[in-house]
Amino acid sequence: MGLDLTLRMADWERLRVIPVEDRIQALDETMWPSDLDDAYHSMYGLADGWVWPPNQGAAWCAEYHFFSTTGSYRSHSKAGDAWADIRVLADASLRDAMDRFLNGLIWDKDPAEEPALTGGGGFFPPVTDRRRPHILLVCPPEAAHGKSRAWERAAPRLEELRGPFAAECEGWAGRPDTFEEFATLIREWGDVVTETARRGWGLLGVP
């Protein structure tokens, strides 16, 4: 795909006071002010987990760097494709929980209705900068809360997907190499959604 994923959680109420067309830029400038020195970039640019703005008074958003990936969106896309393959073999109740959790994050139940392509229902503008061909995901606070609840149901049962993964994905190009790789990334998404929902914030992913 050639894309990276920049994933941020943010206070939607704080974003509402910013004009729609300026919201993504406001997140960029809050996280990485133009006057940052090289020491900050070297210290935080490669850090894993949640990275907060250098100005603690601006701590209304944060950026998440995945421990289990290099930053490429391809890893997330592969995990989403794996779920599309194995969901038909999952128990119905687990499938429902995982669908609710992953839909709109790394897998789309109905891609034609994917809100990220249109700025999340108007909360963000469609991205026209050629360096950012479209928004990768938009998860408003109410959706994050629902996904957190779904993850609570799915997390204890993730091991049930080992067999379906072996049957449908193992050894196939364009899928995670192992079930452990798949499960580790899914659990990281669970942590991200849980923390976002705990704060009552939303998620935005851009290339």
Image (cartoon, rainbow, N blue to C red):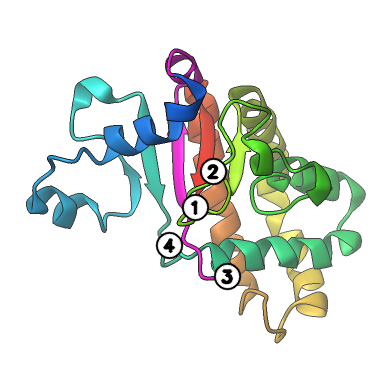
- Going from N to C along the chain, the mark reached first, 1 or 3, is 3
Circle 4 sits in a helix, a strand or a loop, which is it? loop
Q: Report which residue position mark 2 lands on.
A: 127
- Going from N to C along the chain, the mark reached first, 2 or 3, is 3
Q: Report which residue position mark 1 lands on.
A: 132
The type of residue carrying mark 2 is Val
Alpha-carbon distance for marks 4 and 1?
15 Å
Dot 1 and dot 2 residues touching (CB under 8 Å)? yes
Alpha-carbon distance for marks 1 and 2?
6 Å
The answer to whether residue 77 is visible is: yes
Q: Nearer the viewer, mark 2 or mark 3?
A: 2
- Going from N to C along the chain, the mark reached first, 3 or 4, is 3
Q: Report which residue position mark 3 lands on.
A: 1
Start-end of magenta stretch: 1-18
The type of residue carrying mark 3 is Met
Instruction: Please tell me whether residue 123 is drawn above or below residue 83 in the rendered image.
Output: above
Q: Report which residue position mark 4 lands on.
A: 71
The type of residue carrying mark 1 is Arg
**Front-lying residue, 106 or 99:** 106
The answer to whether residue 109 is visible is: no
Alpha-carbon distance for marks 1 and 3?
13 Å
The type of residue carrying mark 4 is Gly
Residue lying at 27% horizontally and 54% vertically, measured from the top left = 47
Residue lying at 29% horizontally and 35% vertically, measured from the top left = 29
**Front-lying residue, 133 or 140:** 133
Point out residue 146 in the picture as x, y percentages from the top left corner.
Answer: 69, 29
